[in-house]
Image (spheres, grey):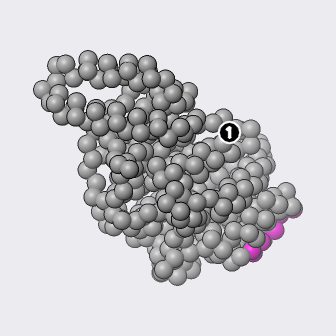
Amino acid sequence: MNRRTFLTLTPSLIIPQNSFAQPNTSTRKFLFIFCPGGWDQCTLFAPLFDSNFVDMEMQSNRGFTQGITYVDSESRPSVRSYLENYGDRTCFINGFEARSVAHDVCLRLVTTGSPQSNSDDWASIISAHHSESLLMPSVHLSGPSFTNQYSHVRTQLGRANQLRTLLSTPSVLDNVEDEWLEKITNQHDSSEFIEKSMSLEQDLKELQSLSFDFSSGESFSQALKMSKEIFSQQLSRTIMLSYNGVRDLGWDTHAANDMQSWHFEELFAHLSSFLMDVDAQQQIDGTPLSDDLCIVLLSEMGRFPKLNFRNGRDHWTYTSAILIGSGVQGGQSIGGYDDFSLGLPVDLNSGEVDQEGTPLDCNNIGATLLTLADIDPAEFTSANPIYAAIRS
């Protein structure tokens, strides 16, 4: 089956573009789960109970499960249960710096390594360097999305499920074709545009033939289910989706920081259920999906270690990431925080805190992801990967 595509699906128009990337032979897939607003490192990743500068959660304590150090609490049984069952395939990367406390800047930094508007996010780079012909190399369900050179690989389902409407209503596809023809009437390179448009139309017809329900869903669990199906059908290499917390309340807890605990509890309950499903899922070529799927959890920043007068926490530049699954050296917490909740330098080879080591930032995370995707990170960043996070 030919699964090559030249398309970007936007909520209003499908725009064919050229491909620029050099492919590699990796089959690893990446599910990016983004928690917008800034999660609290002191609710999960940083058990700083001996520090006078940090307000730790009441009735919580230091936990250590499957090699991972974390903040344990009876109010978060799903976190402990997750680590008991899946900690051996999970890696916490602690204390990397986003180098900003502005949401829009941090969103770009964490997902692209740069504050510049002409940067591509890690998901787009990974998808653009895939050797297989995929119908939808990079799927955007929700969350941040930044593309420039590799915008051609990004498929957006649309907030109102426009892709599903396009595929399920033949007349809509005909109308889009009319728009293409009208658009190229006065273009000098119309022959090239027509050729790409015909290729795109063939891709859309192939998607129609799959009888796949491309509904983005109304819940995080539905989005996870769709992600599993897309990956198992080998339609995509990366998927981005967001988790906005319990009842969509968000992670930007300038007040009522207790919500962070609720969000982590529900998030890890979802992760446990999802990994159970992934472990039972085969891909269309008969291989286990769990062999190929790497899950990446990020938030754009952390929270200030002291509570404010509203029992919330303001923005903080240091935060953590979670890697799970294929290619990940699990059962460990890499890096850490000092008594002021500042990130500590790390030996990139061992993952241990080392005062002579490397202060981690967003580009170290990106370099690690590119290495997991068998892409030379030196092509995109001067930062080195965190080698300790990668299974040899």
**Is residue 59 part of the magenta span, yes or no?**
yes
Q: Position of residue 332 (x, y in %)?
A: 63, 75
Position above or below: 154 against 93: above
Q: Main secondary structure of the magenta part?
A: strand
Rendered residue at 29%/37% (across/down): 199
Rendered residue at 47%/76% (across/down): 387
Query: Is residue 39 found left or right of 82 in the rendered image?
Result: left
Q: Position of residue 381 (x, y in %)?
A: 34, 62
In this rendered view, identify the residue nearer to me: 14 or 90. Answer: 14
Query: Is residue 302 found left or right of 257 in the rendered image?
Result: left
Residue 288 seen in the current view: yes
**As shown in the figure, which amino acid type bears the numbered disc 1?**
Ser
Rendered residue at 76%/61% (across/down): 79
In this rendered view, identify the residue nearer to me: 387 or 164. Answer: 164
Q: Position of residue 328 (x, y in %)?
A: 54, 71
- Residue range highlighted in magenta: 56-65
Q: Quadrant of residue 53?
A: bottom right
Q: Quadrant of residue 201?
A: top left
Query: Is residue 383 found left or right of 169 in the rendered image?
Result: left
Residue 106 seen in the current view: no
Q: Residues within 10 Å of mark 1 (few under 14, many from 20)?
A: few
Rendered residue at 47%/44% (across/down): 139
In this rendered view, identify the residue nearer to me: 220 or 25. Answer: 25
Q: Position of residue 45 (x, y in %)?
A: 67, 64
Q: Secondary structure at mark 1?
A: loop
In the current view of this chain or complex, which residue is farthest to the left? 188
In this rendered view, identify the residue nearer to me: 175 or 206. Answer: 206
Position above or below: 91 against 176: below
Position above or below: 252 against 13: below
Residue beneath disc 1: 219
